[in-house]
Every structure is written in structure tokens, then in C-alpha cells.
Amino acid sequence: MNTSDLIKHFAEATHLPVDVNEVLAVLQQSGCDDDIEFIGVDLDPEILQGKIKIFYARPVLYAEPKRFANIYYHRRHGSDWQRFICCKELLHLLDPTSAHTNSTDAIDVLAEKIGLPPEMQDPVADGIATNVDRMAEWRAAAILLPLASRNVLLEPFREGVLTLDDIARMADIPRRYVGLVMSPIWDQVHRILAQ
Amino acid sequence: MSQEIDKAECPFSGHGEELVNVKFFRGRRDDVITASEIKEQARSAVMQRKLGTATVSKAAPASPHPVIDVKDFVANL
């Protein structure tokens, strides 16, 4: 399974909120047997809101190495941000090898690039690992506010019957991502994400 | 498999672990966030886990909101 399969899997969903544990279940049903932990910690959310670390370790001496995934999130956030961060990080279980960050130098570069504000980002020069990290936010938005749900909500949204805040509350995701999903370009963006 | 990184070399990997992938969720600040700031927060997160002060679960955080079918919801607006 890759992320586009996952996005397509949820595209027809019309129930909200989509539980991140549903996403986890689909991953596990598709063969993912990583040992995953969700770890709530106190972060400075102005600097870092979450992270994932995927690694192999031996559960006991001489045992076969097992793959683990530690997903950290800022636990003082509301459920909208907590869920969104965890979904975004969960999607990195499906990152292609070419997008992995697994050396000290690569982590330094990723941290430097991720720290840049949007106006200083350069998708062409920043490299695949950075772009995959940034794109994962869009992919999480596509899963937690599925296309079918968005399309049902579009008319009342355009008529002003529903606001971005209403939809954010319904989907229980941060408002900023709802704005993206409800924008006219989302059809095109979703097509690309689901390719 | 990727290269093995010793704990002394990299705060993102523990002894005997083989690092596969690390990714970050950027903070909300509008200006440049330095790599040092991000790595310090990442280090702190790992330390909170080691100190036992983190909240650890096999399940993702769930929404307290009731699940609704948006088709039914919109039909009844």
C-alpha cells in the first residue's frame, strides 16, 4: 500500500470525524506490522508540534530485529491538532525509501528545511525527503476530510450555511486545513494526491 | 537496511537501533525556526519518553466529537 491507495480508500467516506485509528487499522490490514506507539509530550508548538522516528531494534537479545515507529505529538493541543499531527506522521510509515531521513547529516538538512517559512521554501532544491514531509500535511487533510464529505459540504459552505469553523468542528481537524480542502483547487490537488 | 547510527552520534537513534526514517511536524512560528531549535524539541520529546513523563499509547488520540454522516446532516439543515 502507498499513500495514494490510502487516500483513495477514504475518499468515499461521508462520516466525520474520521478516526486516526481507522487509518491505522487499514495500514495494519494491508500488512503493516510495525510496533507503533503514540507518545504525547510537552513541546513548544511554536517550534515543533510532532515527529516520527521509525527504527529497527531487537525486542530481546538475539531476536530478529523488529520495526518500531514512535509518533510524538504535543499533548497540550486540542484533539483537532493531536489527531492531525498523528495522522500526518502515521503516513510516513509509507514513505518510499528514497524519501527516508536516516543519517545525522540528512536529519540536519531536513530540520533546516522544515524550519523555513513558506516564502523561503524551494520545492525544487529542498529535496524529496523535505517535500514528502511537507506534502504529508496535505495527504492527512485528504484522509481526515475525505473528498466525498467535502463535496457534500461544499454547497452549504458556498451558500454560507456552514462556515470553515463548522466544518473544522465536524471533521475535528485544524481550521487552516479545512480552508485548503474547501478551496476550489482541492479537486485538482486531490487528483494529484490520489494518483 | 539503512546505516546504523550510534547513540553517541545521533540523538534520534538509541544504542543498537537502526534508524529508518525521521520526519517533523513544523511549529506554528512564521519566521525561520532553526535546525537547533527543532532538534532540541525532538531531543526533549525523547527524554520525556525515557523519563516516563510522556503519555504512551498503542492507539492514536481519538476525537471526543460524535460521528455524524454528513449526507444526513446536510439533508436536515
Image (cartoon, coloured by chain):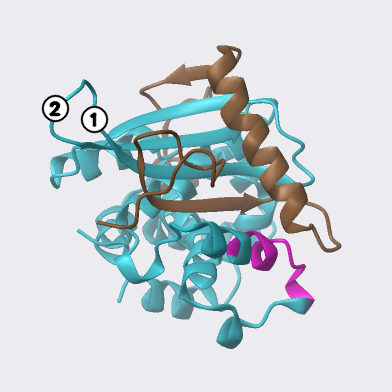
Chain colours: A cyan, B brown
Q: Name the residue under label 1.
A: A58
Please tell me in which quadrant of the rendered image residue A8 appears.
bottom left
On the rendered structure, is B21 left or right of A183? Answer: left
Which residue is depicted at the point 70% across and 49% down? B38
Which residue is depicted at the point 64% across and 36% down? B43
Q: Residues within 10 Å of mark 2 (few under 14, many from 20)?
A: few
Protein chain holding label 2: A
On the rendered structure, is B34 left or right of A21? Answer: right
Which residue is depicted at the point 42% across and 30% down? B67
Q: Where is residue B18 in the image (x, y as percent from the top left)?
A: 34, 45
Q: Name the residue under label 2.
A: A63
In magenta stretch: residue B1: no
Q: Where is residue A194 in the image (x, y as percent from the top left)?
A: 33, 71
- Residue type, numbered disc 2: Ala
The N terminus of chain A - image quarter: bottom left
Marks 1,2: beta carbons within 8 A: yes
Q: In this view, does B20 lie above or below B55?
A: below
